[in-house]
Amino acid sequence: MRVGIHTGRPQRLAADWLGVDVNIAARVMERATKGGIMASGSTLDHIPQAELDALGVAAKRTRRPVFASKAAGIPADLPIYRLYIA
C-alpha cells in the first residue's frame, strides 16, 4: 500500500471528487514506495511541527531524480515530503 496526502479544494460531483487537487494527491501518492507515505508541502503547512514531534513523525523533502521526466500534474514549486517514524 502507498499513501499520498495533499491538502486543497477538490470539487464533489455526485459520488466523485474531481479537480486539480485530486490529481495532485494521486501524483503525490505515485511518488511513494511500497508501504510509504508521502505528503505535499501544502499538507505539512497545516500541521504544526510540535504535533509531528509528539507523534514521532519526521518529514524529509524528496528530490526528483536528475534524469527523471517532469511529473505531470504536480506544480514545479510544490515540495513533496516522505514521512517516516523518527
Image: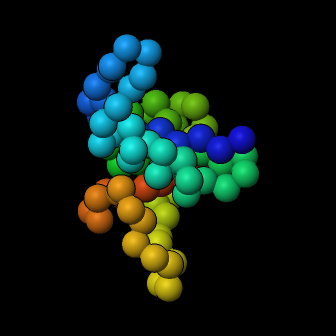
Is residue 55 positioned above or below 31 on the image?
A: above
Q: Residue 56, percent across and down?
A: 60, 38
* Residue drawn at point x = 37 percent, y = 14 percent: 14
Viewer can see residue 35: yes
Q: Nearer the viewer, residue 75 or 19?
A: 19
Which residue is situated farthest in the top direction here? 14
Viewer can see residue 86: no
In the image: residue 62, left or right of residue 13: right
Quadrant (top left/top right/bottom left/bottom right) for the N terminus = top right
Q: Residue 22, percent across and down?
A: 39, 37
Q: Residue 31, percent across and down?
A: 55, 57
Q: Nearer the viewer, residue 1 or 40?
A: 1
Which residue is situated farthest in the bottom direction here? 67
Is residue 26 positioned above or below 79 on the image?
A: above
In the image: residue 7, left or right of residue 32: left
* Residue drawn at point x = 38 percent, y = 47 percent: 24
Q: Nearer the viewer, residue 52 or 2?
A: 2
Is residue 44 positioned above or below 68 on the image?
A: above
* Residue drawn at point x = 31 percent, y = 29 percent: 10
Q: How is the image coloured?
A: rainbow
* Residue drawn at point x = 52 percent, y = 38 percent: 53
Q: Residue 78, percent across and down?
A: 31, 57
Which residue is situated farthest in the front direction here? 14
